[in-house]
Each structure stands twice: as C-alpha cells, then as structure tokens.
Image (cartoon, rainbow, N blue to C red):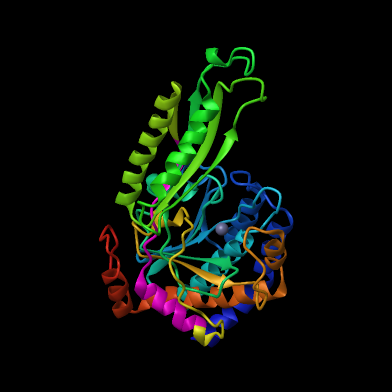
Amino acid sequence: MKDTINRYYNRYRDDIETIVQKIHSTPELSEQETMACKLQVELLENWQFDIQKKYKGIDTAFNARFGKGRPNICIMSEYDALPGIGHGCGHNLIAGVALGTGIVLKELIVKNHLKGCVTVMGTPAEEKRGCKIDLLRAGALEDVDLVLMAHPSDHATSQSMEEAGVMQFLIRFKGRSAHAAAGPEKGLNALDAVRLLFNGVDAWRQQLPETCRIHGVIKDGGKAPNIIPDDTLAEFYLRSFDSNVLLSMKNRFENIAKGAALMTDTTVTVEEISHSYKPGKPNNELNKAFMKLADEYGMKPEWLAPSRASSDFGDVTYEVPAMHAFFNITGENKEIAIHSKNFTQCAASAHAMEQMGKTIKILSQIGFMYLTRKAFRTKVLAAFPFGKKTKE
Ligand SMILES: [Zn+2]
C-alpha cells in the first residue's frame, strides 16, 4: 500500500510543492485569499475534480469533488496568512496536504474502482472569522462522512487534540467627559469601568476550573489625561473545554461588566463578535490510525495534552468523525514558536516539504482504509459521540 501511495504522490509532488511555495511567497490575509484559492481550484480542475467556486456564497471558499456515492471523504484546506508575518501559521502547507491527499485518493478510487468520493474543501479565514462555521451552517457537511486535515506545528507530530472552545466579546463603556482637573465632578469615568472590569475578572479567576482561560486588552482607554474618558473599549476572549461552562462564563462575564458600569454610573454594551468556536472533540480511532502511521513514517509522533488554543475546526468535530492532526516542521529547534517570523521561514523549508509529503501519505492511507474497510468505518463511527447523519 505504502509503495502505491508513494508512486501516486511522486507523480504530483512538483505541482503541489510549487503551489505551496507560491502561496507562501504571496501571503494573503483572511477573506482576501483570491490567488491561493485560484491556484488550488485550477489544479483540481486539471485533475478532473468537479468544482464549485465561491462555495456557499463565500468568495474565497471552494468545493472540489471526485467520484460517486458514499462515503464522501473531505480534506479541508486553509490558506490565509497573518498580518505582518505572512505564513507564520503555515497554512500554505495545509493547502498542500489537502491537494496531495485529494489527488492520491482520487487515483486510488479510479485504480480500484471504488464507490465513494473525495472532496477537497477550501475553508478561508481561519485566522479571523472562522469560515468553517459559515460553511457548515450552510450545509457544506451534509453529504460528507469524514473530515481529515493536518496542521503544521512547532511541537512534536501529534494526534488531533482536544481543543478549547472560545467566545469573543467587545465591551464598550459610555460615560461623560469633563476637564480632569478643573471639573472632574461633572464627568463619568468610562476608563474606571474598564479597570473595574479587569479587576472583577481577576477576582473571578480563582473560582474557575483550571483549564479555563480569559484574556483581554484595552482597545481604547481614552484620549488624554486631562479629559475624563467618556467612551472606552475592551476586547476579551473566554475559553473552556466544556460548552456549558463556556455559556455560564459568558453569563458571569456580562454580570461583571454590568457591575463595573454600575459602580461608575456608566452604561455598558457587551457584544459577541465573530462566531463562538465549540470545544474540539477528536475521534480516537482516527487518532490511533494517524499515530501508528506517523510512527511507521519515522515522524516520532507524541500524544500531546489538550490544547488551550481554539480553532473553527472544533465545530466540525460535532458534525462528522473528524481529525485535525499536527505535523512538526521545526525539527530539532525548540525555540521556534508558531505565529512568528521564524515559523514563517520554516513553512517553506525542505524539511517542511518532506513532513508535508509524509502527512499526505498518512491521510491518504486513512482515507483509503475508510473507503475500503468496513471494520475501520464501524470503529470510527462508534467513536463518534454525536451520532448524526453519517452513513456507513
Ligand atoms: Zn493555523
């Protein structure tokens, strides 16, 4: 099996690596990924995939499918960059993994006359808005049975981790400005309200489960020391591994904000911005398959503890059995952190290309197992706790 997959991958390797390098050298921000989207669509069109551009009404999303009937295995692609540092999250390599796995699975379907499809789905704006949530709300996963994806990492190659869910809020306090020295008694201080909000949150931390996270910044704290600030803005993220805890955190957070307003006689609005991301719940059978193969490919995989970070992939894990594995691209250098310029450099290195190639072969083999082995499908479905719309 490995030899066959290797042969198919080598046939397309140059095309894939060329696109991965082009996306890397022309970084595009979330929702502006027009070139990255076009390059992938053109290649998939050449490979006889059926293409839907602007998928579900999102300009830089796409859906590319090959084959007939079920199961339908979907590989998700990401391709947005970060402001200022380019591909510091290595999403160019995620696109490479999706293209490579897509084409190898297509070859395997054709060669073995298999029933079923392979889909490469372009999911933009992971860094900003979480377009996967828009896509799945629009029904993009309705006829999908399995989702596979892999993300480059500064840690060891690892399984799809449990991830925290996140909610994001903008908090605006409105007071009344006045001269801070000549007439402060005429003012209502909206910066005091922000300070009390931070203090209230800090007092709350001790009572939270250890794995929760709250972090905030002041976006607007006033204009000048001699003006009582009348309009201030803070932004906060709340995170937890439990959706119910997250909802109760939202409630408490809003009450703290209201308390801060009450203490300062200001008014407050708490606005939830962006989608909330659900806590990611990985599929253990897919993880076991990935880890075994990663070991066989010499990637020295390690089972890592749950990640306190969040991704719009979390919501996908409630729809169908899904895997968001990680592959190391930083090698022996433990100093390099994801979301840094050094990581951006790594994302175009020969080592990254090699790790991407291995990951493609692993995901292809898992996809092939799902298409051809009933026992594997049954185990994966049994490990999926949300029992919805997947077909055997
Ligand atoms: Zn990322």
Rendered position, 177 above or below 68: above
Q: In this image, 205 relative to 191: left or right?
A: left
Query: Magenta residues, as a range?
Result: 272-294
Q: Can residue 291 be found in the magenta stretch?
A: yes
Nearest the eye: 45 or 190: 190
Q: Is residue 123 above or below residue 67?
A: above
Where is 270 relative to 355, above or below?
Answer: above
**Residue 361 pos. (x, y %):** 53, 77
Position of 236 compared to 331: left or right?
Answer: left
Q: Position of residue 182 (x, y in %)?
A: 64, 13
What residue sits 38% from the left and 31% below the top? Answer: 259
The one of 348 and 281 positioned closer to us in this rendering: 281
Residue 73 in magenta?
Answer: no
Residue 22: % across, % down: 72, 59
> Quick check: can you spot residue 113?
no
Q: Residue at x 43, y 21 (%)?
A: 265
Q: Give the position of the C terminus as an image quadrant.
A: bottom left
For image coordinates 56% across by 50% down, the residue present is 127
Of 77 and 391, nearer the camera is 77
**Quadrant of the displayed image that contains ligand 1:** bottom right
Is any atom of residue 248 visible in this view?
A: yes
211 vs 361: above or below: above
State the image coordinates of residue 354 (x, y, percent, origin top left). Answer: 65, 77
Marks counted in the figure total 0
